[in-house]
Amino acid sequence: MYEIKDGKIELEHGSISEGLIAIASGKGGVGKSTVTANLAVALQNQGKNVGIIDADVHGFSIPRIIGIEEEVKVEQESELIHPAQKMGVKVISMGSFVNEKNPVIWRSPLLLGALQQFFQDVVWNELDYLLLDLPPGTGDMVLNIMQKLPHARTLIVTTPQVTATNVAGRVGHMAEKMDSEILGIIENMAYYECSECGNKEYIFGKNGGKELAKLLNVDLLGQLPLMKHVREGGDKGNPVVEEANNDDISREFNKIAKEVIKRKKEFDPSLEPMDLKGGPGQA
Ligand SMILES: Nc1ncnc2c1ncn2[C@@H]1O[C@H](COP(=O)(O)OP(=O)(O)OP(=O)(O)O)[C@@H](O)[C@H]1O
Ligand SMILES: [Mg+2]
Ligand SMILES: [Zn+2]
């Protein structure tokens, strides 16, 4: 998979110097992919080199949300893959290799094999951060990443709603069990602020993210508001952080990026990654 050398994750065709971060939520539709795309741009705003692996094979929404300008290129002979890019953020997605009209039935080993290929055959060059947008649920993919990539830390996205924080809590406990570190919690759709009078409405309840953070004994890194232009930006391929740099949500994303950078930690050279395909952990 990779090695730890001179404090970096050395990939076949690149390196990661500050963080390998898996974005998970448990419950679907809470904004994982939106957070991944915007956090990538926010980190890039802080001068970091960022890559994203869209590991959600059924959803693969990252290319649409971030608005890919340049397609993935595969070299004929070497079969090396050059990621797509948007504002310098490098993106690789299962969506680039399957036809939306011909859904592929992915079995776990195949899926994990594809993910492993993204680590090994993609020309990432020098990255500071590699973000993995995970599928919803607490399935195989999430389990395998936590178990086999010991240098990956999990960022949990949840809405304040109890049904979301409960499932997110399960992801957290799963991480604890696997000795996989949780980087923090991000509460999305935390509130809606009326554009007319500024009144805040707590549509999905209040402080669910804070309570989850307390339960898992980790930090709440930010609370993102529910905003119409987040959804619109996501549909158009303009991450809000790029579009409106000084609204509440962009400021919060930039703050979260700083919190993530503050928590950077040396990669432990005594831990060894395992091959994603094959071996224990695969159901
Ligand atoms: N803060 C927000 N304000 C407004 N809309 C949002 C916000 N966050 C996410 N959305 C919208 O909610 C929908 C779901 O978001 P997204 O696709 O990021 O969730 P997800 O957790 O990745 O979903 P899935 O489980 O399907 O992968 C999208 O239409 C997105 O634009
Ligand atoms: Mg998603
Ligand atoms: Zn109002």
Image (cartoon, rainbow, N blue to C red):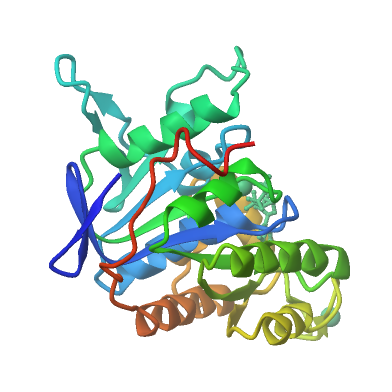
Q: Which quarter of the picture shows residue 182?
A: bottom right
Position of 262 with respect to 8 (left or right) is right
Task: Please determine whether, in this image, residue 40 is positioned above or below residue 256.
Answer: above
Position of 217 with respect to 122 (left or right) is right
Q: Which quarter of the picture shows residue 211?
A: bottom right
Identify the residue at image location x=24%, y=71%: 47
Task: Please determine whether, in this image, residue 282 is positioned above or below residue 238.
Answer: above
Position of 250 with respect to 45 (left or right) is right
Q: Nearer the viewer, residue 37 or 259?
A: 259
Q: Position of residue 220 (x, y in %)?
A: 61, 83
Task: Please determine whether, in this image, residue 106 is positioned above or below residue 267.
Answer: above
Task: Please determine whether, in this image, residue 11 is positioned above or below residue 44.
Answer: above
Q: Nearer the viewer, residue 249 or 34?
A: 34
Identify the residue at image location x=47%, y=33%: 278
Identify the residue at image location x=55%, y=37%: 60
Q: Position of residue 112 (x, y in %)?
A: 48, 34
Q: Position of residue 148 (x, y in %)?
A: 45, 51
Report if residue 101 is visible in the image.
yes
Q: Residue furthest top?
A: 102
Q: Position of residue 3 (x, y in %)?
A: 22, 54
In the rendered image, which quarter contains the N terminus? Answer: top left
Identify the residue at image location x=61%, y=56%: 32
Q: Which quarter of the picture shows residue 105?
A: top right
In the rendered image, which quarter contains the C terminus? Answer: top right
Position of 65 with respect to 123 (left or right) is right
Report if residue 239 is visible in the image.
no
Counting labels gives 0
Quarter of the displayed picture in which ligand 3 can be seen: bottom right
Q: Nearer the viewer, residue 198 or 260?
A: 260
